[in-house]
Image (cartoon, rainbow, N blue to C red):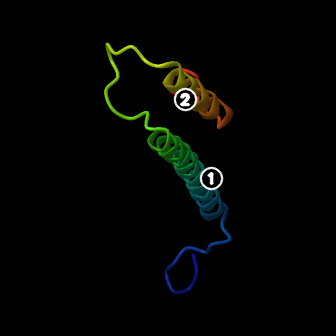
Amino acid sequence: MAQDGRRDPRQPGCILRANLRLRTLEQELHRTNKALRELAIENTLLQGKIRRRLTGPIRGTRLPAEVKRFIVRAVTEAKNSGMPLETS
């Protein structure tokens, strides 16, 4: 211990705790960055859907060929952006 009652930061226990905390923060940062990247991709794809007027209910409606092509392009764009096919 240091003379003022605090632990000496050069002691092995303090170094191990600091390394563990650093590793934990790095993992947390990685998870946060991954989530932000996924949100950015989703936002970009949503903007593309809005731009192509693909938002809104289409269930049970026969779609014109032009709309089908837009949907195929949107899914292809999502796949190319790194999103899994099921999600895109």
* Whole-percent x, y for residue 80 in the image: 68, 33
- Residue at the spot 53% in from the left edge and 19% down from the top edge: 65
Residue under numbered circle 2: 70
Of the residues shown, which amino acid type is indicated by label 2?
Answer: Phe
Location of residue 70 (image quadrant): top right
Q: Kindly report the distance in space between the C-alpha atoms of the residues bearing marks 2 and 1.
A: 44 Å
Q: Earlier in the sequence, mark 2 or mark 1?
A: 1
> 22 left or right of 58?
right
| Badge nearest the viewer, 2 or 1 | 2
Q: How many marks?
A: 2
- Residue at the spot 63% in from the left edge and 34% down from the top edge: 77
> 58 left or right of 30?
left
- Residue at the spot 43% in from the left edge and 33% down from the top edge: 54
Of residue 11 and residue 38, the one placed in the foreground of this image is 38
Q: Secondary structure at mark 2?
A: helix
* Whole-percent x, y for residue 19 in the image: 64, 57
Q: Report the residue that reaches farthest toward the bottom.
A: 4
How many neighbours does mark 1 have within 10 angstroms: few (below 14), some (14-19), or many (20 or more)? few
* Whole-percent x, y for residue 28 in the image: 54, 51
Of the residues shown, which amino acid type is indicated by label 1?
Answer: Arg
- Residue at the spot 33% in from the left edge and 32% down from the top edge: 56
Q: Secondary structure at mark 1?
A: helix
Of residue 29 and residue 34, the one placed in the foreground of this image is 34
> 58 left or right of 69?
left
Residue under numbered circle 1: 23
* Whole-percent x, y for residue 21 in the image: 57, 57
Q: Quadrant of the N terminus?
A: bottom right
Marker disc for residue 51: none
In the rendered image, the vertical position of residue 9 relative to residue 16, given as above or below: below
Of residue 1 and residue 14, the one placed in the foreground of this image is 14
How many neighbours does mark 2 have within 10 angstroms: few (below 14), some (14-19), or many (20 or more)? some
